[in-house]
Image (cartoon, rainbow, N blue to C red):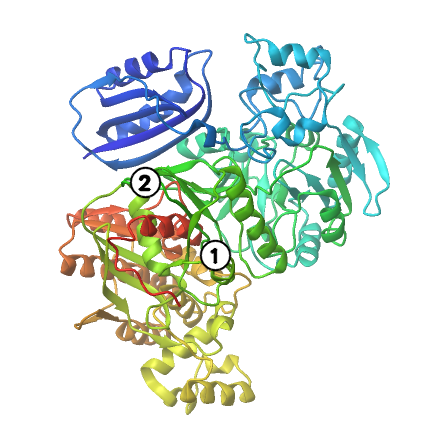
């Protein structure tokens, strides 16, 4: 099948023969489309079979012109439009280049060669950079991007650096963070009390020694502090979990080099490309069954077949990992659910009970920028957390926008904010869950920061419909005439916008929680969407959640609510495998809550359905973080199982997906000792069949899949394959998170069409 790939390449790619190179490569591969220069880089569209387009993408980076530097290469697969030839088009001269900010970029190979060259004046200097790499977004205070407008303004350039900075033929021409040991930032190793132990390279060597001997070090990185320690010592890992209050959530790993990654993980070409890319995100990789596991202890990601892996991306990381020569944990410098620390004062206050030592530097960080997380699914990159390397690159909406500026404040979990400028929507770095004062303060700072950076004075504010979200309360308290967008509609609009769709589509929006139009908790929704209006066409049967939000961390509560919806009070009158996990007093309280509908909100959430099935099958009984039970259910699914369970579709104004037969069959299979792995696979297959069945009733060709549930690779891959087999065209997220990190884009995508949309009334 012919597909179209849309590519934006940024960096030193103009005036170096890049367009002729692309033309020659595209002609060799018999692609149709075009290449042109735009104010923000090189823009390419090409059409052919997916396999050939994959070759094209990989060869661009491998065979680029000698003097071309690719700082970032973003691409998305879209529907073909029917190009008849490949051509070099005239350059675009329009576009707001002044509002364009590059993300922070991993150190380039040229700088690394110089840093490890004993004859170079920047030998072993941990802040080496050039025009083609280094900090951007994390040091910019205001536009335009000139040194006086960055946190580097406090460092006066020496004569040698100034000469390079002013030489148009030099690689450091107008490199705003330019520095050297004589005039730039430096590092120091400190104790939690502030005692300086060592400076410069000695500090790095001593830090490596401390880590090697089992200490936890808070390292001031590019966009905030990281906590670094050994990855092979269970005692150190247990201590880090205890101090950081992070019970079971996996830790990210940093490996010294690509070869060491391959010893432990399976790495395919697109995953390798990601690891080595200028964005340098955390990439989710499958563990090898017989890898060199003694270097990475299983407790880093207990019961998880994947590791989150990254390579060193700053000079400081390279210097440290070169000394250690072992994988290390590299996790955000914070307590769980809090944002990263970015200043020394903040770090010593919030991390003093976590870190044994502090490796700091004196280049101020203007804004926190966490590590991005990416997974390759169906040979496409899926960004799960969008931050360093990607934010705040814009997404262009495929619709006419007026001159108004829209500010979207996102949701409550995995929060991001977004700001529109013309057709571009700038989506912020990952902020996180707004459940702590520190996180909410960070959210407010990002809102103010974006308004300042993009000189947005009069903004139309868009927020989630949920009246208790802190982001929504903030919008209502600080702005007039706020537009409220229903959570699951924002999910659908986000995916629709990212894929540049037009016309009608069936939107599938599945997640853990979102405020519904009827005041209940939604999360298993289907919409007919035409780009301008929504029609709610199907929904999962609702069931009560005793304890409300408490059910997120206690899947047994979702299971009780599910069984109560099927069997009523009968479940309390006989021996029950679920209720044995509650005390007698808890059972009495549960029954009263369910009977009297006290703190037992109704939900249609597929995420909570996952939790309940994970509990009923014995796969996961407690969850230390949101989505853990669902993840374990995904990982448990047996391969090569095609069967599914029967279910009912109950007709009405909104089609109701009745899952009761599914749960009753699962309970019977558990009694008959059917493997939980087989049950998991059949449950996933059932969800795929539900999507296909509703799609067939909708008579829509385009099927848009969005929401946190679609981070599940087993579900997404099988849904895409089955939909394509039945003649549908499925779409899913690539550059914007499918979880609530994509809500802010969807909110703006809805709001810009507010004159056409059937907007919900403000709460």
Is 3 situated left or right of 424 in this image? left
**Mark found first going from the N terminus, 1 or 2:** 2
Q: Quadrant of residue 584?
A: bottom right
Return the residue at label 2: 397
| Label 2 neighbour load within 10 Å: few <14, some 14-19, many 20+ | many
Marks 1/2: CA–CA distance: 24 Å
Q: Is residue 83 left or right of residue 421?
A: left
The label number, if any, that marks residue 749 in the structure image: none
Whole-percent x, y for residue 742 in the image: 41, 49
Residue 637 position within the rendered picture, expressed as x and y whole percent measured from the top left: 37, 57
Task: Please tell me which residue is depicted at 41% across the width and 58% down the height of the picture.
Answer: 482
Mark 2 residue element: loop
Which quadrant is the N terminus positioned in?
top left
Residue 161 position (above or below residue 590)? above
Left or right of residue 347, residue 370 in this image: left
Q: Quadrant of the C terminus?
A: bottom left
Q: Quadrant of residue 497?
A: top left
Let me know if residue 639 appears in the view: no
Tag 1 residue: 479
């Amino acid at each position: 099948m012919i597909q179209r790939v849309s590519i934006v390449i940024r960096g030193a790619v103009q005036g170096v023969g890049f367009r002729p190179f692309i033309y020659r490569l595209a002609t060799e591969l018999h692609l149709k489309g075009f290449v042109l220069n735009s104010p923000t880089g090189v823009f390419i569209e090409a059409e052919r079979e997916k396999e050939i387009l994959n070759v094209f993408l990989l060869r661009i980076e491998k065979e680029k012109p000698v003097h071309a530097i690719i700082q970032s290469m973003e691409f998305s697969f879209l529907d073909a439009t029917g190009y008849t030839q490949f051509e070099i088009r005239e350059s675009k001269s329009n576009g707001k280049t002044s509002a364009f900010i590059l993300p922070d970029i991993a150190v380039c190979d040229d700088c690394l060669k110089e840093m490890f060259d004993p004859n170079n004046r920047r030998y072993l200097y941990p802040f080496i950079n050039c025009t083609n790499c280094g900090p951007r977004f994390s040091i910019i205070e205001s536009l335009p991007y000139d040194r006086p407008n960055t946190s580097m303004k406090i460092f006066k350039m020496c004569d040698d650096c100034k000469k390079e900075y002013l030489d148009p033929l030099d690689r450091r021409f107008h490199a705003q963070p330019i520095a050297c040991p004589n005039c730039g930032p430096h590092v120091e190793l400190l104790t939690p009390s502030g005692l300086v132990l060592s400076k410069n390279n000695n500090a790095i060597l001593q830090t490596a020694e401390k880590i090697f001997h089992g200490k936890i070090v808070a390292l001031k990185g590019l966009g905030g502090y990281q906590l670094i320690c050994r990855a092979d010592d269970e005692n150190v890992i247990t201590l880090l979990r205890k101090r950081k209050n992070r019970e079971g959530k996996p830790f990210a790993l940093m490996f010294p080099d690509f070869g060491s990654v391959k010893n432990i993980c399976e790495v395919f070409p697109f995953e390798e490309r990601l690891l080595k890319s200028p964005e340098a995100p955390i990439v989710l990789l499958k563990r090898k069954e017989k890898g060199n596991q003694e270097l990475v202890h299983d407790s880093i990601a207990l019961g998880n077949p994947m590791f989150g892996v990254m390579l060193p991306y700053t000079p400081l990381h390279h210097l440290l990992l070169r000394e250690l020569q072992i994988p290390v944990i590299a996790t955000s410098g914070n307590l769980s659910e809090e944002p990263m620390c970015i200043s020394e004062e903040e770090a010593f206050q919030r991390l003093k009970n976590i870190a044994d030592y502090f490796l700091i530097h004196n280049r101020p960080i203007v804004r926190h920028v966490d590590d991005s997380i990416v997974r390759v699914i169906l040979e496409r990159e899926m960004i799960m957390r969008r931050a360093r390397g990607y934010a705040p690159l814009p997404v262009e909406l495929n619709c006419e926008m007026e001159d108004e500026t829209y500010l979207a404040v996102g949701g409550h979990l995995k929060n991001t904010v977004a700001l529109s400028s013309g057709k571009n929507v700038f989506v912020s770095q990952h902020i996180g869950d707004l459940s702590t004062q520190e996180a909410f303060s960070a959210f407010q700072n990002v809102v103010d920061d974006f308004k300042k950076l993009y000189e947005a004075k009069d903004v139309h504010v868009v927020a989630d419909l949920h009246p208790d979200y802190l982001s929504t309360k903030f919008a209502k308290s600080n702005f007039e005439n706020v537009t409220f967008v229903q959570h699951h509609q924002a999910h659908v609009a986000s995916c629709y916008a990212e894929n540049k769709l037009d016309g009608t589509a069936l939107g599938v929006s599945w997640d853990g929680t979102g405020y519904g139009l009827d005041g209940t908790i939604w999360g298993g929704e289907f919409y007919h969407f035409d780009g301008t209006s929504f029609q709610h066409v199907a929904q999962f049967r609702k069931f009560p959640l005793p304890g409300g939000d408490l059910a997120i961390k206690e899947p047994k509560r979702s299971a009780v609510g599910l069984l109560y919806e099927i069997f009523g009070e009968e479940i309390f009158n006989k021996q029950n495998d679920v209720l044995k996990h509650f005390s007698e007093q808890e059972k009495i309280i549960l029954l009263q809550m369910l009977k009297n509908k006290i703190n037992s909100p109704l939900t249609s959430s597929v995420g909570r359905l996952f939790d309940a099935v994970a509990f009923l099958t014995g796969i996961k009984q407690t969850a230390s973080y949101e989505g853990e039970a669902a993840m374990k259910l995904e990982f448990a699914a047996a391969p090569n199982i095609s069967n599914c369970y029967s279910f009912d579709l109950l007709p009405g104004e909104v089609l109701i997906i009745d899952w009761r037969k599914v749960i009753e069959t699962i309970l019977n299979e558990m009694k008959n000792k059917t493997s939980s792995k087989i049950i998991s696979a059949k449950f996933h297959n059932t969800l795929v069949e539900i999507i296909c069945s509703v799609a067939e009733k909708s008579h829509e060709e385009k099927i848009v899949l969005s929401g946190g549930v679609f981070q599940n690779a087993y579900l997404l891959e099988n849904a895409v394959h089955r939909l394509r087999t039945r003649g549908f065209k499925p779409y899913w997220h690539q550059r914007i998170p499918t979880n609530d990190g994509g809500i802010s884009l969807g909110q703006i995508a809805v709001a810009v069409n507010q004159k056409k949309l059937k907007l919900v009334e403000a709460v």
